[in-house]
Image (spheres, rainbow, N blue to C red):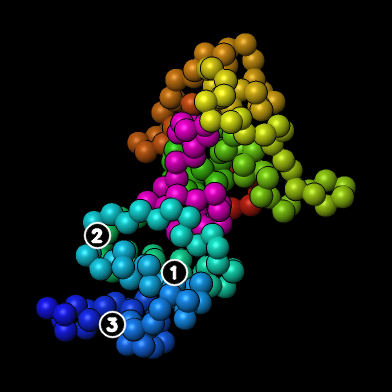
Amino acid sequence: NRKAARAAAVELLDQVGLPDPAGTARAYPHQLSGGQRQRVVLALALANDPALLVCDEPTTALDVTVQALVLDLIVRGVLDRAAAMLFITHDLAVVATACERVLVMYGGRIVEAGPTRQVFTRPRHRYTQGLLGASDLAVVDERGRLATIPGSVPAAGRFPAGCVFRNRCEHATEQCRVRPDWTVTGEDSGFACYHPAPATTARAEGIDD
Ligand code: SF4
Protein backbone atom coordinates (compact mmCIF):
# COMPACT_ATOMS: atom_id res chain seq x y z
CA ASN A 1 0.00 0.00 0.00
CA ARG A 2 1.00 3.63 -0.32
CA LYS A 3 2.09 3.93 3.29
CA ALA A 4 4.42 0.91 3.06
CA ALA A 5 5.76 2.14 -0.29
CA ARG A 6 6.55 5.56 1.17
CA ALA A 7 8.27 3.99 4.20
CA ALA A 8 10.33 1.77 1.91
CA ALA A 9 11.27 4.78 -0.25
CA VAL A 10 12.41 6.76 2.79
CA GLU A 11 14.43 3.78 4.05
CA LEU A 12 16.16 3.41 0.67
CA LEU A 13 16.94 7.13 0.52
CA ASP A 14 18.45 6.79 3.97
CA GLN A 15 20.55 3.80 2.82
CA VAL A 16 22.08 5.86 0.00
CA GLY A 17 23.18 8.48 2.50
CA LEU A 18 20.73 11.33 1.87
CA PRO A 19 20.67 13.55 4.98
CA ASP A 20 16.89 14.16 5.05
CA PRO A 21 15.34 11.04 3.51
CA ALA A 22 11.72 11.91 4.40
CA GLY A 23 12.12 15.43 2.99
CA THR A 24 13.90 14.16 -0.11
CA ALA A 25 11.06 11.70 -0.78
CA ARG A 26 8.71 14.69 -1.09
CA ALA A 27 11.12 16.93 -3.05
CA TYR A 28 11.01 17.82 -6.74
CA PRO A 29 14.16 17.00 -8.74
CA HIS A 30 15.06 20.70 -9.17
CA GLN A 31 15.20 21.03 -5.39
CA LEU A 32 18.08 18.52 -5.20
CA SER A 33 21.73 18.84 -6.22
CA GLY A 34 23.28 16.68 -8.97
CA GLY A 35 24.88 14.37 -6.40
CA GLN A 36 21.60 14.03 -4.48
CA ARG A 37 19.68 13.22 -7.68
CA GLN A 38 22.27 10.59 -8.54
CA ARG A 39 21.72 8.99 -5.13
CA VAL A 40 17.95 9.02 -5.64
CA VAL A 41 18.45 7.20 -8.94
CA LEU A 42 20.67 4.68 -7.17
CA ALA A 43 17.93 4.12 -4.55
CA LEU A 44 15.44 3.55 -7.40
CA ALA A 45 17.80 1.08 -9.06
CA LEU A 46 18.29 -0.87 -5.81
CA ALA A 47 14.59 -0.84 -4.84
CA ASN A 48 13.73 -4.24 -6.28
CA ASP A 49 16.91 -5.99 -5.09
CA PRO A 50 18.26 -6.57 -8.59
CA ALA A 51 20.52 -9.54 -9.28
CA LEU A 52 22.45 -7.36 -11.75
CA LEU A 53 22.87 -3.61 -11.67
CA VAL A 54 23.82 -2.04 -15.00
CA CYS A 55 25.50 1.34 -14.47
CA ASP A 56 26.09 3.33 -17.64
CA GLU A 57 28.43 6.25 -16.87
CA PRO A 58 26.77 6.74 -13.46
CA THR A 59 29.25 9.26 -12.10
CA THR A 60 30.41 11.14 -15.20
CA ALA A 61 28.65 14.46 -14.53
CA LEU A 62 29.69 14.64 -10.87
CA ASP A 63 32.68 16.40 -9.37
CA VAL A 64 35.46 14.15 -8.05
CA THR A 65 34.44 14.25 -4.37
CA VAL A 66 30.77 13.47 -5.01
CA GLN A 67 31.83 10.87 -7.59
CA ALA A 68 33.87 8.99 -4.97
CA LEU A 69 30.92 9.08 -2.57
CA VAL A 70 28.39 7.83 -5.14
CA LEU A 71 30.81 5.15 -6.32
CA ASP A 72 31.25 3.93 -2.78
CA LEU A 73 27.46 3.83 -2.29
CA ILE A 74 26.97 1.86 -5.50
CA VAL A 75 29.63 -0.70 -4.59
CA ARG A 76 28.33 -1.04 -1.02
CA GLY A 77 24.69 -1.27 -2.21
CA VAL A 78 25.68 -4.04 -4.62
CA LEU A 79 27.79 -5.91 -2.05
CA ASP A 80 25.04 -5.69 0.61
CA ARG A 81 22.61 -7.34 -1.79
CA ALA A 82 25.12 -9.91 -3.08
CA ALA A 83 24.28 -8.60 -6.55
CA ALA A 84 26.51 -8.24 -9.60
CA MET A 85 27.34 -4.95 -11.28
CA LEU A 86 28.12 -4.11 -14.89
CA PHE A 87 29.83 -0.73 -15.18
CA ILE A 88 29.95 0.98 -18.57
CA THR A 89 32.42 3.84 -18.51
CA HIS A 90 35.33 5.58 -20.19
CA ASP A 91 36.74 6.54 -16.78
CA LEU A 92 39.69 4.27 -16.06
CA ALA A 93 39.99 5.44 -12.44
CA VAL A 94 36.39 4.35 -11.85
CA VAL A 95 37.13 0.94 -13.35
CA ALA A 96 40.22 0.54 -11.16
CA THR A 97 38.19 1.47 -8.07
CA ALA A 98 34.97 -0.44 -8.63
CA CYS A 99 35.54 -3.44 -10.92
CA GLU A 100 37.02 -6.90 -10.47
CA ARG A 101 37.05 -7.73 -14.14
CA VAL A 102 37.30 -5.52 -17.19
CA LEU A 103 36.32 -5.87 -20.84
CA VAL A 104 38.00 -3.33 -23.12
CA MET A 105 35.93 -2.42 -26.19
CA TYR A 106 36.83 -0.61 -29.38
CA GLY A 107 34.62 -0.23 -32.44
CA GLY A 108 31.90 -2.33 -30.82
CA ARG A 109 34.18 -5.31 -30.22
CA ILE A 110 35.76 -6.69 -27.08
CA VAL A 111 39.50 -6.47 -27.76
CA GLU A 112 40.81 -7.52 -24.36
CA ALA A 113 39.41 -9.02 -21.15
CA GLY A 114 40.77 -10.02 -17.79
CA PRO A 115 41.04 -9.26 -14.08
CA THR A 116 41.33 -5.49 -13.61
CA ARG A 117 44.77 -5.59 -11.99
CA GLN A 118 46.15 -7.76 -14.77
CA VAL A 119 44.72 -5.63 -17.60
CA PHE A 120 45.85 -2.38 -15.98
CA THR A 121 49.38 -3.51 -15.18
CA ARG A 122 50.07 -5.81 -18.14
CA PRO A 123 47.86 -4.74 -21.08
CA ARG A 124 48.36 -6.94 -24.12
CA HIS A 125 46.15 -5.43 -26.83
CA ARG A 126 47.63 -2.35 -28.48
CA TYR A 127 44.46 -0.30 -27.93
CA THR A 128 44.40 -1.11 -24.20
CA GLN A 129 48.04 -0.15 -24.04
CA GLY A 130 47.37 3.18 -25.78
CA LEU A 131 44.33 3.90 -23.63
CA LEU A 132 46.20 3.36 -20.38
CA GLY A 133 49.23 5.23 -21.71
CA ALA A 134 47.01 8.24 -22.44
CA SER A 135 46.10 8.52 -18.76
CA ASP A 136 49.57 7.92 -17.38
CA LEU A 137 50.82 11.08 -15.67
CA ALA A 138 54.31 9.57 -15.46
CA VAL A 139 54.62 9.61 -19.26
CA VAL A 140 54.32 13.15 -20.62
CA ASP A 141 56.19 14.98 -23.38
CA GLU A 142 58.56 17.92 -22.89
CA ARG A 143 55.57 20.30 -22.70
CA GLY A 144 53.87 18.18 -20.04
CA ARG A 145 51.22 16.78 -22.38
CA LEU A 146 49.86 13.26 -21.98
CA ALA A 147 50.49 10.63 -24.64
CA THR A 148 47.73 10.26 -27.24
CA ILE A 149 46.53 7.57 -29.61
CA PRO A 150 47.10 8.78 -33.20
CA GLY A 151 44.08 9.62 -35.37
CA SER A 152 40.48 9.64 -34.23
CA VAL A 153 37.67 7.15 -33.81
CA PRO A 154 35.98 6.50 -37.19
CA ALA A 155 32.28 7.21 -37.59
CA ALA A 156 29.96 4.29 -36.86
CA GLY A 157 30.06 1.83 -39.74
CA ARG A 158 33.41 3.19 -41.02
CA PHE A 159 35.72 0.98 -38.97
CA PRO A 160 38.31 -0.86 -41.05
CA ALA A 161 37.88 -4.51 -41.94
CA GLY A 162 40.06 -6.95 -40.04
CA CYS A 163 41.25 -5.48 -36.77
CA VAL A 164 38.98 -2.52 -35.97
CA PHE A 165 41.90 -0.60 -34.45
CA ARG A 166 44.08 -1.06 -37.55
CA ASN A 167 44.04 2.53 -38.92
CA ARG A 168 45.26 3.94 -35.58
CA CYS A 169 47.72 1.26 -34.55
CA GLU A 170 51.48 1.84 -34.82
CA HIS A 171 52.07 -1.92 -34.84
CA ALA A 172 49.68 -2.76 -37.69
CA THR A 173 50.91 -5.05 -40.49
CA GLU A 174 49.31 -6.63 -43.56
CA GLN A 175 48.24 -9.50 -41.32
CA CYS A 176 45.95 -7.12 -39.40
CA ARG A 177 43.67 -6.81 -42.45
CA VAL A 178 42.18 -10.12 -41.29
CA ARG A 179 40.22 -10.10 -38.05
CA PRO A 180 42.47 -11.49 -35.30
CA ASP A 181 41.36 -14.54 -33.32
CA TRP A 182 40.89 -14.42 -29.59
CA THR A 183 43.99 -15.51 -27.71
CA VAL A 184 43.18 -17.08 -24.35
CA THR A 185 45.67 -16.10 -21.66
CA GLY A 186 43.86 -17.47 -18.61
CA GLU A 187 40.60 -18.86 -17.30
CA ASP A 188 39.04 -15.42 -17.47
CA SER A 189 41.26 -13.44 -19.78
CA GLY A 190 42.39 -12.95 -23.35
CA PHE A 191 42.84 -10.49 -26.22
CA ALA A 192 42.49 -10.22 -29.99
CA CYS A 193 45.73 -8.90 -31.48
CA TYR A 194 48.42 -10.24 -33.84
CA HIS A 195 51.23 -8.20 -32.33
CA PRO A 196 50.45 -7.82 -28.62
CA ALA A 197 52.61 -6.13 -26.03
CA PRO A 198 54.89 -8.70 -24.40
CA ALA A 199 53.35 -10.42 -21.39
CA THR A 200 56.38 -9.53 -19.33
CA THR A 201 56.05 -5.75 -19.85
CA ALA A 202 54.50 -4.33 -16.69
CA ARG A 203 53.33 -0.71 -16.48
CA ALA A 204 55.04 1.23 -13.72
CA GLU A 205 51.77 2.51 -12.33
CA GLY A 206 49.76 -0.21 -10.59
CA ILE A 207 46.39 -0.20 -8.88
CA ASP A 208 45.39 -0.98 -5.34
CA ASP A 209 43.97 -4.39 -4.45
S1 SF4 B 1 45.79 -6.74 -34.52
FE1 SF4 B 1 47.28 -5.46 -35.55
S2 SF4 B 1 46.23 -3.50 -35.87
FE2 SF4 B 1 45.09 -4.63 -34.34
S3 SF4 B 1 45.87 -3.91 -32.41
FE3 SF4 B 1 47.01 -5.76 -32.93
S4 SF4 B 1 48.83 -5.02 -34.01
FE4 SF4 B 1 47.36 -3.35 -33.97
Look at mark 2 in the image and give the residue it sits on.
50
Look at mark 1 in the image and give the residue it sits on.
38
Dots 1 and 2: beta carbons under 8 Å? no
Q: Earlier in the sequence, mark 1 or mark 3?
A: 3
Quarter of the figure with the N terminus? bottom left
Q: Is residue 108 magenta?
A: yes
Left or right: 201 with respect to 57? right
Query: What segment is highlighted magenta in the picture?
Result: 86-112
Look at mark 3 in the image and give the residue it sits on.
10
Image coordinates for residue 193, horizontal then vertical, percent: 53, 24
Q: CA–CA distance between discs 2 and 3?
A: 18 Å
Please, what secondary structure does the residue beneath circle 3 have? Answer: helix
Question: Given the image, on which type of amino acid does mark 3 rest?
Answer: Val
- Number of numbered callouts drawn: 3
Q: Nearer the viewer, residue 191 or 49?
A: 49
Q: CA–CA distance between discs 1 and 3?
A: 16 Å
